[in-house]
Image (tube, grey):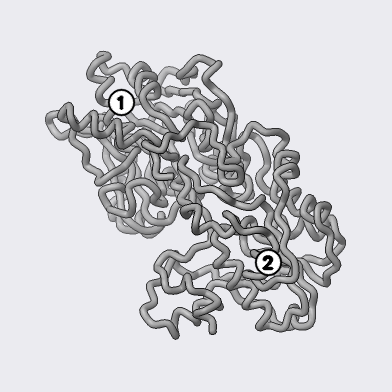
Amino acid sequence: MISKLFPIFNQKKSSDKFHEECGIFGIYSPQKVDTFSLIQFGLFALQHRGQEACGFSVLRDGFILSHKSEGLVLDSFRKISNSEYFHGNAAIGHTRYSTEGGQSKKNIQPFFGEDSYGKSTISIVHNGNLINAQKIRKDLESKGVTFISEYSDSEVILRLIQKYLSEYDNNLEIAIQKTTIDIQGAYSVIVLMDNKIAAFRDPNGIRPLCYGMLNEKTYIFSSETCGIDSVGGYYIRDLFPGEMAIVDKKSIRFSLLKKEKYTKRRICSFEYIYFSRPDSLIENINVYEIREKSGEKLYEQHPVEADVVIGVPDSGVPASIGYSKASGIPFKPILVKNKYIGRSFIIPKQEMREKMVNLKLNSILNEIRGKRIVIIDDSIVRGTTSRRLVYILRKAGAKEIHFRSASPPIIAPCYLGVDTPSRKDLISYNIDKEKIAKILNVDSLEFLSMRNLIDILGGKNYCFGCFTGNYPIHIKKNDCIL
């Protein structure tokens, strides 16, 4: 029975993918522009980084105006009847997938602070995860600081910045510097305040953040270059680990938040494997090329005789094209993805849950029956999606199924801005490759080796925590539930 093959259908959350926490976007112009459209385009380009909620703040005539709602970017913006109300000279925005803080409406970004008259004076958006946020929040609350969110490490950053602004004569640069001394973890942040924008990254640069220009006076900040492209801008470079940029009417200024010896580039390797859009550059490296090379390396590692190569839409397709190029085995887009399916379904009856096997993905039967198939996905997390796919292919009459993962086995959860299962829910934790192959019901199973992943990325200056259990930041048991 399918219910025995896929017991995960009995759960509301059944995804076999890691989920990035969010995407952030900001734009600054010395003059009033159509910030409503620009922030909408930028967030829409970053929609893949979060689909639960979105929000934005606009600086208009010295006032910060904000809008936040659950749902996809376009649905959120359609709720706004008067778009010209959000025309200003600067804006920041956020598209969310919850990690810390959960799914409460109170946790939707941006977070903003108000003065004693109720006027918003500062707003921030944050991508990442702090490992010491609970401790800082308790300390601030003991000193009378009020929090709006049920729990959000992003709001902790905001309240710390506000604290230091009051202590250092409203100097944003000093306030951010002081804040980054207190916080630990992964953070890429954009701040809107006092007719200026500031953007900064943690000393390891774990989560991405780049900047570009729309014209000679208008600056753009984005989690990925695809956000800059979406508004017709041009990419300049990524912010360095531990770097801060502040833009105002006069200029853009850069500074290092900590001494250089404390900065060490360790961007998340999963940005290249899965999170980022294939048309983006991350740290000036083409994401699509990395994924295609992973497929080539997979064939070099573990060649197999087969009739066709297929990729799991969408993230497994570039690797499958690379595998096909290296092997000479033809690639065919046999798996068809329903592009109009929603994020998730809550199906109460088992009979209907079973029908979901073919709802998101279906196969072209004539291209599968009697064929030896190599199927490539970007990764295997819980194994639930992989089992579904194998079931579909077996039912369609595949003669052999050889499964390939374009990443090494995932053996550890992430605490630095990615929603991941606990160790016990990771199929590769404490289970060897041969047993996983039996669980998946495939003829062979192979993972990209760590050595080849490092070779493809061009070095070891990345976070490989989910593959090794070693993180660029020392994580204490008191900070996180391990």
Q: In the rendered picture of this protein, how many numbered marks are placed on residues?
A: 2
Q: Position of residue 168 (x, y in %)?
A: 27, 14
Crowd class of label 1 (few under 14; some 14 to 19; many from 20; radius 10 Å): many
**Front position among marks 2 and 1:** 2
Kind of residue at disc 1: Ile
Position of 437 relative to 268 (above/below) = below
Work out whether residue 136 can be spotted.
Answer: yes
**Could you tell me which quadrant the N terminus lies in?**
bottom right
Identity of the residue drawn at 56% across and 78% down:
358
Cα separation between marks 2 and 1: 50 Å
Position of 420 relative to 334 (above/below) = above
Instruction: Find disc 2 in the rendering and name its residue.
Output: 437
Q: Secondary structure at mark 1?
A: helix
Q: Position of residue 303 (x, y in %)?
A: 84, 59
Is residue 15 rendered to the left or right of residue 69? right
Location of residue 367 by image quarter: bottom right
Instruction: Find disc 1 in the rendering and name its residue.
Output: 161
